[in-house]
């Protein structure tokens, strides 16, 4: 494998947590529910996914359990902001702190203070027949772990759902003008709740990806700010899955370049290399916010009895 192929494949692998967390943010946001709990839900997903996988010996079960826990947190966000009409930012922060604390607590309760760090088997590489034999592209795109293919399918599936189906149009209508959507018979409350729930599940899977692909174990700092970057990436992508996918590749490439430079003993302090992805993100966002169009009702609670939207 050439150096280019190695870097390209590492970039594809590093794209997954950014992509899934950002798509989860996008899904709820298109219906008007804006989450700021990504970082905490990802940490909790990493903890639950690792612990279940470690306990039962199945990464698949671990991923499903992580998705279930993330869905519960998304459901709480959707229900609290839709049915109780509580402030979305406040509830999101509360869920962030709750998820972060619960992640560490679960790990300590289950694993305890053991001297040896518990490990799980990381996800194996699955080569797609014929496609994996294509020069360069086969190695980069079609010789990866299962969650890489899953993330790609989710991105493509959401694009077709949002822009090629009536249900997707209804969902976007809820985030743009819920009063008008309600008058057309679109279930506004149900839409906001299920999108927030599905979004939470995707965020948790993004977190579970990290121990199951990168480290084989769980640490409380494993997410490393990816949840916060997912929020920026969603704005950068203009709340559209195709642009979010492109942005996720860019963010991942910055991560890989910084890591390879550090491993390659470049004469630059490691702290400077670690901050490169965030500086690149800041520079991109300065320009992205000028053209990014957010859902008109993003972050606002809908009151059916109100005279205004």
Image (cartoon, grey):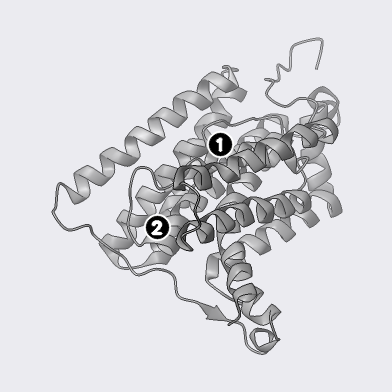
**Whole-percent x, y for residue 188 in the image:** 72, 31
Marker count (numbered): 2
Residue where numbered disc 2 is placed? 211
Compared across the picture, whether 59 is left or right of 116 comes to: right
Residue 64 visible in the shown view: no
Q: Under tag 2, what secondary structure?
A: helix
Figure quadrant of the N terminus: bottom right
Task: Report the disc number at residue 294.
Answer: none
- Few, some or many residues within 10 Å of mark 2 (<14, 14–19, 20+): many
Q: Which residue is pictured at 64% across the width and 50% down the height?
A: 251
Q: Is residue 171 above or below residue 89?
A: below
Question: Splitting the image into 4 quarters, where does residue 2 fall?
Answer: bottom right
Residue 196 quadrant = top right
Q: Quadrant of the C terminus?
A: top right
Q: Is residue 67 visible?
A: yes
The location of residue 132, given as percent across then percent down, is 64, 84
Q: Which residue is mark 1?
A: 228
Residue placed at 63% from the left, 88% from the top? 129
Left/right placement of residue 184 relative to residue 235 reads: right
Q: Residue at x 39, y 30 (%)?
A: 98
Residue 79 position by quadrant: top right
Distance from label 1 to label 2 (Cα)? Answer: 19 Å
Residue 271 is situated, as x and y percent measured from the top left of the image, at 46, 43
Dot 1 or dot 2: first in sequence order is 2
22 over 57 or under it: above or below: above
């Amino acid at each position: 494998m050439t150096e280019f192929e190695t870097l390209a494949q590492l970039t594809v692998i590093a794209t997954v947590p950014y992509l899934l967390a950002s798509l989860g943010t996008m899904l709820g946001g298109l219906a008007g529910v804006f989450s700021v709990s990504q970082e905490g839900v990802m940490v909790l997903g990493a903890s639950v996914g690792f612990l279940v996988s470690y306990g039962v010996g199945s990464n698949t079960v671990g991923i499903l359990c992580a998705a279930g826990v993330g869905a519960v947190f998304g459901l709480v966000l959707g229900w609290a902001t839709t049915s109780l009409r509580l402030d979305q930012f406040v509830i999101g922060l509360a869920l962030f702190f709750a998820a972060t604390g619960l992640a560490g607590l679960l790990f300590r309760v289950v694993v305890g203070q053991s001297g040896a760090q518990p490990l799980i088997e990381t996800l194996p590489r699955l080569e797609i027949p014929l496609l994996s034999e294509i020069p360069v592209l086969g190695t980069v795109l079609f010789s990866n772990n299962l969650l890489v293919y899953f993330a790609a399918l989710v991105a493509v599936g959401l694009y077709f759902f949002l822009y090629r189906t009536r249900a997707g149009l209804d969902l976007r209508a809820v985030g743009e003008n819920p009063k008008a959507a309600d008058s057309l018979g679109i279930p506004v409350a149900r839409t906001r709740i299920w999108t927030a729930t599905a979004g939470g599940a995707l965020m948790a899977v993004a977190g579970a990806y990290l121990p199951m692909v990168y480290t084989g174990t769980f640490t409380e700092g494993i997410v490393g700010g990816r949840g916060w970057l997912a929020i920026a990436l969603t704005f950068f992508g203009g709340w559209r899955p195709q642009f979010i996918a492109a942005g996720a590749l860019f963010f991942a490439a910055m991560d890989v370049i910084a890591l390879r430079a550090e491993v390659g003993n470049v004469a630059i302090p490691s702290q400077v290399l670690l901050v490169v992805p965030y500086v690149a993100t800041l520079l991109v966002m300065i320009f992205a916010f000028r053209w990014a169009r957010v859902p008109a009702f993003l972050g606002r609670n809908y009151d059916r009895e109100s005279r205004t939207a």
